[in-house]
Image: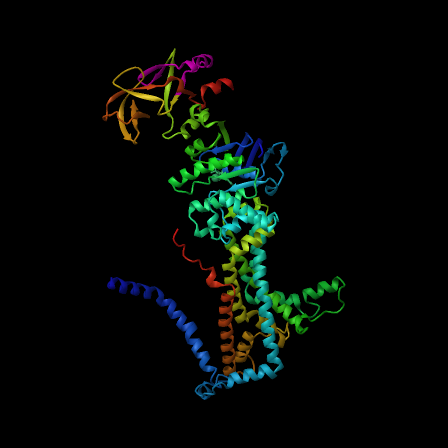
Amino acid sequence: MVEITLKGITKRFGNFLALDNINLKINDREFMALLGPSGSGKSTLLYTIAGIYRPTRGRIYFDDRDVTDIPPKDRNVGLVFQNWALYPHMTVFENIAFPLELRKVPRDEIERKVREVAKMLHIENLLHRYPWQLSGGQQQRVAIARALVKEPDVLLLDEPLSNLDTLLRLEVRAELKRLQKELGITAVYVTHDQAEALAMADRIAVIKEGKILQVGTPNEVYYKPKYKFVGWFLGNPPMNFVEAEVEGDYLRVYSSRIPVPSHYREIIEKLGIKEVILGFRPHDAQIVKGVGDGLLGEVYSFEPLGREQIVTISLDGVFIKVFAPEEESFTFGEKVTVEIREDRIILFDKEKEVALEYLYKD
Amino acid sequence: MNRMGREKIKDLSFFLFPMILMILFFYIIPLVMTVYTSFTPLRNWNVERYLFEFVGLYNYERLLYMFQHDPTFKAVILTTVVFLGITLVINVLGGLVLALATFFINERIASGFRLLWLLPRMSPIAVYSLVWYYFFHGSEIGTLNSILMKLGVISQPIPWGQIIPWGAWSILIFVNGLVGVSFGMIVFTSALNQIPRELIIAARVDGASTWDISRKILIPLMRWHILYVLTWQFLSLLTTFHHIFLLVQWNLINRDYGTTLALYVFNTAFGRGEQDQGLAAAAAVILSIVGIIGGYLTLKLLKFEKMMKKPRGDF
Ligand SMILES: Nc1ncnc2c1ncn2[C@@H]1O[C@H](COP(=O)(O)OP(=O)(O)O)[C@@H](O)[C@H]1O
Ligand SMILES: [Mg+2]
């Protein structure tokens, strides 16, 4: 139950800059997701919090305590790995008991605590088995139990669900979220799966190439991406991006013209910017048949998904994706107009790929 | 189906043929010949006269008699037991310690360090033996003696290898042990590199010291390799005699307490003076039986079967 503060964390492996000046505050009892593509430095950051890596520069605080120079064992963190890292020569019981044995906890207390945590994770009838006798989901639970048994202040999870099949992943996801809140433990959860981060986390830190691009609630990072990358990385299908030119109060998008969204008028005026990238989510637009007010294009393809369908529309050769209700029917090549929900439009600078409002603030 | 089966056998025999031939020529035939010879009074390679004379267990009875009454042969047996026991422990433990030590230090330093320990194995037997011949030499030209004399620890050179039994044994064990550790080291190092890093990280986070990690995680996970090295080294120490032969031949170590059974077999069959191939063959058969029993026991001892995983079952 601690608050974690990272101040200017930089980590180099030789010449390679794995973490670049990371500043992040993780609140007490918060579920923080570190989201980013593979190789972005998520695990490195997690291991730095755990104390396995020493930062090249910067300080780490647990509450007011500076733990930068404190070895992992004295930080009281529980760590869960992607491959679960269960000791193959120990039974489930021995695996879970191992952290307590190292702490020289009395035998009967170990017994009690192991059973308690095993019960919590519904593995109490597997205690005598060896890891190779368990399914992936069960091994995963054992790994979590082993991390929790020592009652850590912080739970660190490195892509714990990515080795599970899709259905199981959804199930464990809900359970893990619930468990974290019930225990009231500060959790840092590394994942490259944006849906997982959106579904589970209180806040998400989006990482790319060792830098934190944006920190915010799932809603904020989803609807208010600070960078084009964030908008692209979150959501399935990702955000649509089209190039636009400012023409007075209008944006020219290829052969179409739409008004500058009201929340951008002042910013554009102040920046005096001409070329922007217009971003919007596939569900923040609707398709109107025929030619109207909006982005004009033609239906390239459509994929029914049950409740709704994804329609791919070609705007003079540039593809965008928009959700449409299931009952609507389309034909290939049909002329349509895409009407975007104005308040959901994000405009990015074409060069820096950062949302204009941030460009304006910096 | 049947045709395919026959095809398979044809393929298999094609690939196995060279190996089977090798085993036949270099293992089965010599073994049969050795066993046969042990029942003949063959001496001085006088094949026409002795090879077809059958003496039953006479050679084995002689070995038993020597074992009970001949001080030289008793020394050979004792030397073999002591040499084998201690060198085996040094080889396995030394290899384990070296592998673990290099595992926990910086990789670049570790590989240099490992190379250093490989030198004894890489140098030609004669060169390597010569190095230690000069090191342990009994006069003042011996490196050890001259160092100790310079330091003023001793005033007269000590003929180390002639101190019986431990002087001779120590040199024997030292020289062979040094060659042997690198084998264990290499096997264990590769075993350690197979162990997922996360296991070690997890243990570290839970507060395990390097010693805890070695004892409770790494060594148990290397059971199979330890068993392998133990058996392999046991068998190779049982039969090795190259270094020992040279050290005895050069008079560095005492002949009686420097001769193991393997060297005894060699000397008796091919050595200077009276050669007694019948007796040597009997001793060689005994040596083989010990090897087979020893190998079998080591496998048993470390619960070979238990380590073989049971199938995963129904979940
Ligand atoms: N111990 C290390 N030595 C050198 N480079 C490393 C080490 N660990 C990670 N890296 C590099 O740092 C980058 C980030 O790695 P990592 O944190 O594992 O990424 P992620 O978990 O986001 O996939 C990668 O390019 C990786 O190659
Ligand atoms: Mg990772």
Residue A145, position as x, y percentages in the image: 51, 44
Q: Is residue A75 rendered to the left or right of residue B277?
A: right
Residue B32, position as x, y percentages in the image: 43, 78
Residue A32, position as x, y percentages in the image: 50, 32
A184 up-or-down from B1: above or below: above
Q: Number of labelled discs?
A: 0
Quarter holding the N terminus of chain A?
top right
Camera-side residue: B134 or B199? B199
Camera-side residue: A198 or A248? A198
Q: Which residues are magenta?
A: A251-277
Residue A325 lies in the magenta-colored region: no
Residue B108 appears in the picture as rendered:
no
Q: Quadrant of residue A29?
A: top right
Q: Residue at x 63, y 68 (%)?
A: B171
A276 up-or-down from A77: above or below: above
Residue A256 lies in the magenta-colored region: yes
